[in-house]
Amino acid sequence: MSVLKPILGLDDAFGEQASNLRALQFRLFEIYNKAGFSEVIPPLVERPQSLVSGAGRFLSDQTLVFSDPADAGQLAIRPDITPQVARIAATRMQSSDELKLYYSGQVMLARPDARSGSRQQWQTGVEYLGVSGEAGDVEVMHLAGLSMQAAGFSSPVLQVGHMGLISALTVGSETALETWVKTLSRRSPEDMANQLADEDLPQANKEALMALAAGQGDDVWLAAIANQINDDFATAAQELLQLVQTVESRLAGEVTIQIEVAVVPRFLYHSGMVFSGFADGSSRALLHGGRYDEMMKAHGREMPATGFSFDLWSWL
């Protein structure tokens, strides 16, 4: 095999593609700078424990680990930049109670993405740390909509869900939450029925999960069922309904907000509100975001955090 043969799932950018990528990148930077966010540039490699500790453990199967010839021990190529931002916020920037950060850089997956077949992404994103509740969530959702507009996508839509709802529906199950999320992401009633066949869950929970798999989890459905599952479900439902109402009133005319309870995050370190971005002509999610307070705890700092990210290459 020729050593010059391209590595499967990796590619080069040059000429017009490289120029377009930089042009879009700088347009986005202007938006984030204007909103009071500052750029952070983490290294390409980290110690594996920093990437997969705590809530970041869901990245472990996509993290490429190798031995450092300079005797630094085991190192890992980042598959996602958010855990690095969490590490920086908990160490290098611990004197700041509130952090508004953005980044843009390459990440590498240990295995090809199931849909695109690619192992590389030019991850760009925004992280707002130190602010809990609606204030932080509204800010990042606003920037998510502006980002899609800056890239030329028309009629941007944010579909919003809440991990607390899925957790409440599956509480008591011996099946891992990650498995439930994967099943929901396929939006297949048949797959959900197979998953539920051997589950000892309340009938109301099973019916709700089947409804989500069938794409019925909108705001009307959520309001009707909010108090029919359990206390945790009711709390998360009220939080989500209130958030969407606030976002709609503040971002009217900029981006459409839709409740979709079956929305699931790209990586399962999110613990609260989650959202995905779509636009006219996009059959796949353009971006993913949400609240990830639990990740900060893993780095030794109690700090609320929310944000979003996307692959700049795929946007081109």
Image (tube, rainbow, N blue to C red):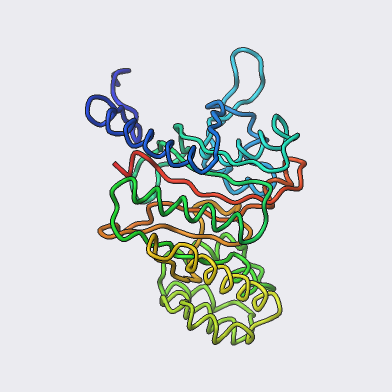
Q: Is residue 112 left or right of residue 180?
A: left
Q: Is residue 88 left or right of residue 316?
A: right
**Residue for point 55% across, 62% down:** 179
Task: Report which quarter residue 180 is drawn in.
Answer: bottom right
Q: Nearer the viewer, residue 297 or 71?
A: 297
| Residue furthest to the top | 70
Q: Nearer the viewer, residue 15 or 50?
A: 15
Q: Position of residue 7 (x, y in %)?
A: 34, 28
Image height check: is 169 above or below 107?
Answer: below
Image height check: is 228 above or below 195?
Answer: below
Q: Quadrant of the C terminus?
A: top left
Q: Position of residue 252 (x, y in %)?
A: 42, 66
Q: Nearer the viewer, residue 68 or 121?
A: 121
Task: Report which quarter residue 81 is drawn in.
Answer: top right
Image height check: is 195 above or below 103?
Answer: below
**Residue for point 66% across, 14% down:** 71
Q: Is residue 122 left or right of residue 129?
A: left
Q: Quadrant of the N terminus?
A: top left
Residue 14 visible (yes or no): yes
**Residue for point 59% across, 51% down:** 306
Task: Report which quarter residue 145 is drawn in.
Answer: bottom left
Count of numbered tags: 0
Image height check: is 3 above or below 222?
Answer: above
Residue 193 visible (yes or no): no
**Residue for point 36% across, 50% down:** 148
